[in-house]
Amino acid sequence: MILFNSDIVEILQNALSEQYLDSTLLSSCGIGFKFCDVNIHCNERVIARINGNIYEWDDSPNSAPWGNLVRQQFSSVCLSSPSLLKITLQSGDYIEIESVESQYESVIINFPSKGKEIIMETF
């Protein structure tokens, strides 16, 4: 799809403010991070700092302690580059999500519905 831009940084900063990471979902074809009201599903590479160690998810399950991110409070979001979006938690741990320009979705972000509307951003 497309690369990240400054608009998604502002949208996520507002949407994730005062939220915590509710759960993680690791599967053979993706990795997901669910905050209280926002769900982020990643199909490309994800780099994370968890308890001071760096881990990478790249299209397959692995033994990284993804569950250790759960219940951590959101701190900030920024662009490391147009292809990398970094979500930092108050502990200092972070999730860096990759998007690539292609015909397939790299990242799908679902926001709370408004009535019957489903609100999402696709990169």
Image: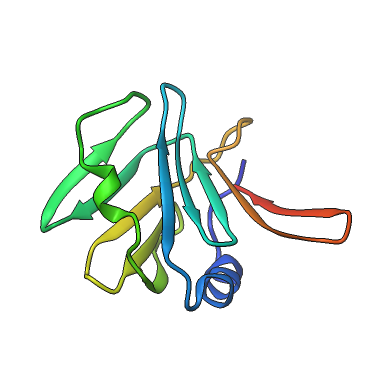
Residue 85 x %, y %: 42, 58
- Scheme of colours in the image: rainbow
**Rendered image quadrant of residue 72:** bottom left
Q: Nearer the viewer, residue 51 or 58?
A: 51
Quarter in which the N terminus is drawn? top right
As drawn, 55 above or below 73:
above
As drawn, 80 above or below 69:
below
Residue 43 x %, y %: 48, 34
Q: Write the residue at 48% across / 71% down.
A: 19
Q: Residue furthest right?
A: 116
Q: Write the residue at 31% across / 25% down.
A: 61
Residue 28 x %, y %: 41, 21
Going by the image, does 109 lie left or right of 94? Answer: right
Residue 69 x %, y %: 29, 54
Q: Nearer the viewer, residue 77 or 90?
A: 90
Q: How many marks?
A: 0
Q: Residue furthest left?
A: 52
Q: Write the residue at 48% across / 45% down.
A: 99
Going by the image, does 19 lie left or right of 63? Answer: right
Q: Write the residue at 60% across / 36% down.
A: 105
Q: Nearer the viewer, residue 19 or 59?
A: 19
As drawn, 60 above or below 90:
above
